[in-house]
Image: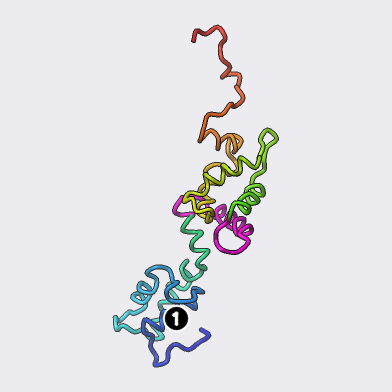
Amino acid sequence: LEFDVFQDGHLDSDRFGKVLCKLTGSDTVANLPDGLLWQAFRDADGNHSKSIGFLEFALWYARHGFTENLLLSDAQRQVREIARKYNLPLVEVEQYKRKFDGYDEDGSGEIEFGEFERLIISMVKVPANCELPHSRIKQFWVEADIDRSGSIGFEEFLIFYWRYLRPGQSVCPFEEYYRSIRRVNLPITREEKPDPYKRR
């Protein structure tokens, strides 16, 4: 460690909290993941003396130094939590987060309509039989802005994009979107052509 916190050969919970901040990149103890300080201190305090000696710390770090809470930044942990929450592939969620951050011009963690419009256009490859007029993007925005706050965070964007516009769907993503909110006139396949002689 770059600073000496073992002033008397032991760490109390306050000084151990400073070590955790250094390891996790957190500015303050208050920004540590919920419960991390209490759980980590309890695990490290092998003799329950309410202080941690160097050997206890070394053993704890050998066991836990490469866990997610210590290796990842707050932003990275949040992305993983969102991926787990919705059971989505982490690689794709991280990819969408990078895209989202690229259009979050002020770094606020949220995007407004203009940023949303540019983001959607950049992420969706519009097929030849689909259009993307401004009015439709406005409807997408209304759907995406779940809390009607006038801006959307990454989680709101991810829910909307994954549900309606993600690549690899069997139909045009805009048709899929409109199918969910109203009936659309899709091309009639040979099997679906109505029988003109069938009594209605």
Q: In the rendered image of this protein, does residue 110 appear above or below residue 196? A: below
Residue furthest right in the image: 128
Q: Quadrant of residue 93?
A: bottom right
Picture residue at 54% right of the left edge, 51% below the top: 157
Please provide the residue range marked out in magenta.
83-111
Across and down, in percent, residue 84 comes to 46, 54
SS label for mark 1: helix
Does residue 200 belong to the magenta stretch?
Answer: no
Mark 1 crowdedness (10 Å alpha carbons): few <14, some 14-19, many ≥20: some
Residue furthest left in the image: 48
Picture residue at 67% right of the left edge, 43% below the top: 125
Mark 1, residue position? 18
In the foreground, 119 or 23: 119
**How many labels were placed on the picture?**
1
Picture residue at 53% right of the left edge, 53% below the top: 150
Picture residue at 39% right of the left edge, 82% below the top: 14
